[in-house]
Image (cartoon, rainbow, N blue to C red):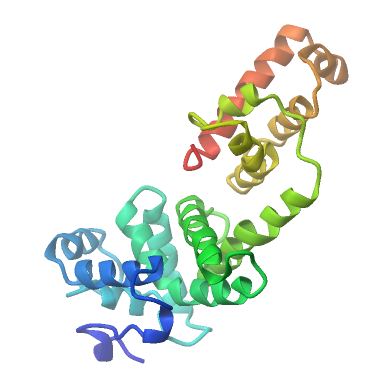
Amino acid sequence: MTENQNSSRLEWSPGLTHRTNSPVSKLVKEWQLISSRRKEVDVVNSWRLPGGEVENLDQVLVRAGFNTARDDSQGDGYLWLLVKHASQDELAARIVLQRILPPLVAIARRRGQILDGGIDAAIAEVLPTAWTVIRQYPWHRRPNKVASNLVLDSEYFAFVQANRTKKVKVFSVEPKLLSEIVAEPENDEVIQEISLESLISVAISQGIQSRHVDVLRAVASGKTAAAIAKQYGIAERTARAWRATAISELRERTRCVA
């Protein structure tokens, strides 16, 4: 499928959605609205991406590898540029989400067969997770196979890691600690559902310092500043400073969770 064949509008398969009012249907309808709207097209053209100006956002999807060969290195490179913009620009993130929407729906259908709540529950998990993955993608460290990485990461964080968190004992972290990181949790159940370890996993993917990870896990396991100070052979005041710095970096690395 060439760009010329898609220079007007992409045809979104009816099989992509399972009912007209689903989140996926709403995304497709939203895309049909914005894909040729001058405001969004002008913003994309201001990025000066390879290939020159576009007439609509469907052309952007094709250039980013939508419905092209799996080994489309040119499309992968173009998608990488979009993901770079996505870390700071919501329109870029929205384009990337549309680019990987079909495989995300395929994941939801497969996971929905074994998930309580079926495909609706699976879609409710994978779409917001994909958005987070897109906005936080470490583009500087993972420049290749971008589409595959985004899809695999979305499935992992939505279903695999979440399932592991439910199976293992949740850290005995004080609600106060997580409330310093997660903005205004509604109740303690929400705090425990989020779990410090899941936040740390996201922060690790974003390059948080390893020492800060160790300090956070020590605090989560119930160690006091005195115990941490003894473990590292430092003053208790220094241990408290390490703790504050670690929490601050964790909050920064996982800011989209807050």
Q: Residue at x 60, y 58 (%)?
A: 158
Nearer to me, 60 or 90:
90
Q: Eyeballing the image, is 253 above or below 168?
A: above
Residue 7 horizontal/vertical position (percent): 22, 84
Horizontal side of 240 relative to 124 (left or right) equals right
Give the quadrant of the N terminus: bottom left
Q: Eyeballing the image, is 216 above or below 12?
A: above
Horizontal side of 158 relative to 222 (left or right) equals left
Q: Residue at x 53, y 84 (%)?
A: 71
Horizontal side of 213 relative to 147 (left or right) equals right
Residue 48 horizontal/vertical position (percent): 25, 63
Q: Residue at x 69, y 24 (%)?
A: 174
In the image as oriented, which residue stretches furthest toward the left?
A: 38
Q: Eyeballing the image, is 185 above or below 238?
A: below
User: Can residue 6 be seen by looking at this rendering?
Assistant: yes
Residue 124 horizontal/vertical position (percent): 50, 60
Q: Eyeballing the image, is 258 above or below 15?
A: above
Residue 114 horizontal/vertical position (percent): 67, 71
Nearer to me, 12 or 240:
12
In the image as oriented, which residue stretches furthest toward the front?
A: 117
Q: Residue at x 81, y 21 (%)?
A: 223
User: Which quadrant of the structure image shows residue 209?
Assistant: top right
User: Can residue 143 be seen by looking at this rendering?
Assistant: no
Nearer to me, 168 or 9:
168
Nearer to me, 68 or 157:
157
Horizontal side of 40 relative to 92 (left or right) equals left
